[in-house]
Every structure is written in structure tokens, then in C-alpha cells.
Image (spheres, helix red, strand yellow):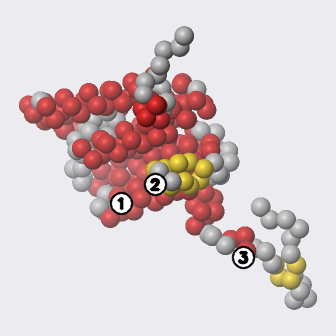
Amino acid sequence: MRRSSGPDWLRPVTERLSPTIRTLVIANAFLFAFYVMVPPAQPLFRNHLALGSSVSAGEAWQLFTSLFVHLDFLSFVFNLLGLWFVGAAIERSVGRTKFLVLFFGPALLANVAMAFVALWLRTGEVFAGCSLAILGTFVVFGRIFDRTPARVFGSLVMEARTLTAILIAFAVLGDLTRLSWASVAGDVVVVLSAYVLSGGRGVGPLQLWRRISSKGGVARRRYQVIDGGRSQRPPFVN
């Protein structure tokens, strides 16, 4: 007899918690709980584990440790929610090893870009959390599943690529609103590198945005002007 995997209402949650995703969630949750419950350790997190100006003084580990350190509750919750939402689906599609490469690789490159821009502009910003890693996984999610409908919440369903485009726009506009040029650089690097590392096939970031933002694009291309002033309709338009 098979053991029950838990109550029926809990299965939609547990089905998305593969061993890899569960490990990442537990690691982030443990460190955030430690940060909140042990106040004397908070300067250590902010000054030596999060990504800050001291990375130029030889603390290169910040490029990696900052992906596990969260300094505020909202970013912690939304990052883990995003990881839970798409992580297991991507892992099932590409395998555990490639998933980890796609999760950490673009985020590490983005952290390098952010550190460089922040040091160049001397902003003194501190970056923490795995939000860039999550944004990168959504880029991969949009590339792999493209037009596949994804249930976001309740009856709200949209194509995977649409959800990806919305999150990219939200991240970039949010960073532009804060005038955080280092964060904008990180967004650009993580989107492009996630697309390249995931194979670079299918719909690219620019094509993805153009297709989604141009409703009626098919209608506009339906007719074309040829010599003589006549219009001609192509035999088929995707």
C-alpha cells in the first residue's frame, strides 16, 4: 500500500516542493529566521553576507551568500513564493543539475554587474535576497513553456510567456522608480544570461515583449502594399 502524501488540500503545495526546491526554501527560511530572531547577528548579515561595498575589499563570497540572505520580510515571502511557483516545473523539464546552473549562474553574473555599477557610482547600496535568481528562473519558465497556460491564482490563467514579461517589466520599472541603476543593470544581465544559458532557442526577450505588447499585430500585418497600389493578403500568418 502507498503511504498518503498528506491531505488533499495540501497536495497542490507539496507537489511543487521537489527535494531541490525544498532544500533551497529551508536554507533561505533558516537564515531569515536566524536574522530576525538573533539581533546581534544582523550587522554580520548586512555587512559581510549581503552584497555591499566591502566586496571590493576581498569579500568575494558576498556574490554567493547574498542570494541566501534576506533583510526584509516582503522580499523573503515573494522570493520563496516565486521559487515554489516555477522551480519544480523547470527542474522536471531540464533536470536538477541544469536547474541549479540556471538558478545560480545568471544571478551570480547579475551580482557581479550590480557590484561593479554600485562601486562605480559609489551608491553604497546593499543587495540581499534571491530575487534576481527568481527573475532568471521565470525567464527560463517563459522560454520553456511559452504559450502554455499557467494558473497564477484561482481562476486567473495566463500564458507562461505573458507572466514572464509582466514580471520583467515590474522588476525593471520598480528599480527605475527607485533610481537604482545597479539594480537595473542586474535585471538586464540576469534576463539576458538566463535566456542564453537556457539554450537561447524559442522566443527571445525582445521578441517576447513585442509579441505580448502588440495585440492586434496580426491584424496590422494582414495586408501589405505592393507595387501598383494593390493590397495582398499573405496565405497564412502565425
Kind of residue at badge 1: Gly
Tell which tag, 1 or 3, sits nearer the viewer: 3
Pick the front one: 234 or 78: 78
Mark 3 or mark 2: which comes first in sequence? 2
Q: In this figure, which residue is indicated by the disc labeled 1?
A: 174
Kind of residue at badge 3: Arg
Q: Are marks 2 and 1 in contact (CB under 8 Å)?
A: no
Query: Residue 220 got which mark?
Result: 3
Residue at x 13% of width, y 35% of height: 43
Q: CA distance from mark 1 to mark 3?
A: 32 Å
Residue at x 54% of width, y 10% of height: 1
Helix, strand or loop at label 2? It is helix
User: Tag 2: Cα neighbours inside 10 Å, few (<14), some, or many (≥20)?
Assistant: some
Residue 130 appears at what percent x and percent y? 36, 39
Q: Classify residue 129 as left or right of residue 233.
A: left
Q: In this figure, which residue is indicated by the disc labeled 2?
A: 167
Tally of marks: 3
Residue 132 appears at what percent x and percent y? 40, 44
Q: Classify residue 219 as left or right of residue 5.
A: right
Helix, strand or loop at label 3? It is helix
Residue at x 46% of width, y 54% of height: 167
Residue 185 appears at what percent x and percent y? 41, 53
Residue at x 43% of width, y 51% of height: 187
Camera sees residue 167: yes
Q: Quadrant of the C terminus?
A: bottom right
Q: Residue furthest bottom?
A: 229
Helix, strand or loop at label 1? It is helix
Camera sees residue 48: no
Kind of residue at badge 2: Leu
Q: Quarter-wise, where is residue 220 in the image?
A: bottom right
Q: Classify residue 95 as left or right of residue 71.
A: right
Tell me: residue 95, above or below residue 188. Answer: above
